[in-house]
Amino acid sequence: MSKKMLATKLHDALCPKCNNRCHCGGMCDFTHAATTDEDWEMNPANRYFLNLSEKATAIMEETHIDEETFIHYANEIAFDKPIPPEVYDSMLAHNFID
């Protein structure tokens, strides 16, 4: 899977504005129809999720989990649910979470 496709999946699963977890107002700037590298680099929301996808790829390789499992775990963190310690530690090490 490409990092851009993973970035879109991460956005769709984790974006607080799009998933009604953010109540600060405003619309999400993520562009699903981004077609060029410039679209990904110039749009802050796209750039943020592309950066997350690069971190996610490293974490998945390190912990030997698939994309669906990773997205599930990433979503669980947003709701303070427990995830396997080795995955959590890898997320911390790769600055996926604070």
Image: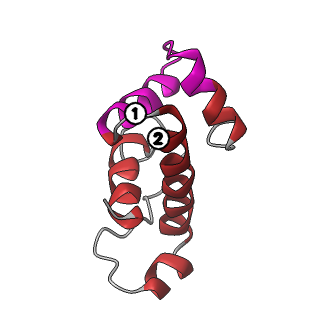
The residue drawn where x is 61% and y is 35% is 91
Q: Nearer the viewer, residue 57 or 31?
A: 57
Residue 48 on the magenta span: no
Over which residues does the magenta segment extend? 68-88
Mark 1 vs 2: CB contact within 8 A: yes
Residue 47 lies, in percent from the top left, at 54, 68
Residue 84 on the magenta span: yes
The Cα atoms of the two marked residues, 1 and 2, are separated by 5 Å
Question: Is 73 rendered above or below residue 43?
Answer: above
| Label 1: which secondary element | loop
Residue 26 lies, in percent from the top left, at 48, 56
Residue 35 lies, in percent from the top left, at 32, 83
Residue 90 vs residue 32: left or right?
Answer: right
Residue 95 lies, in percent from the top left, at 69, 43
| Label 2: which secondary element | helix
Mark 2: which amino acid? Met
Mark 1: which amino acid? Ile
For marks 1 and 2, the one nearer the N-term is 2
**Label 2 sits on residue:** 60
The residue drawn where x is 54% and y is 79% is 41
The residue drawn where x is 50% and y is 63% is 50
**Label 1 sits on residue:** 65
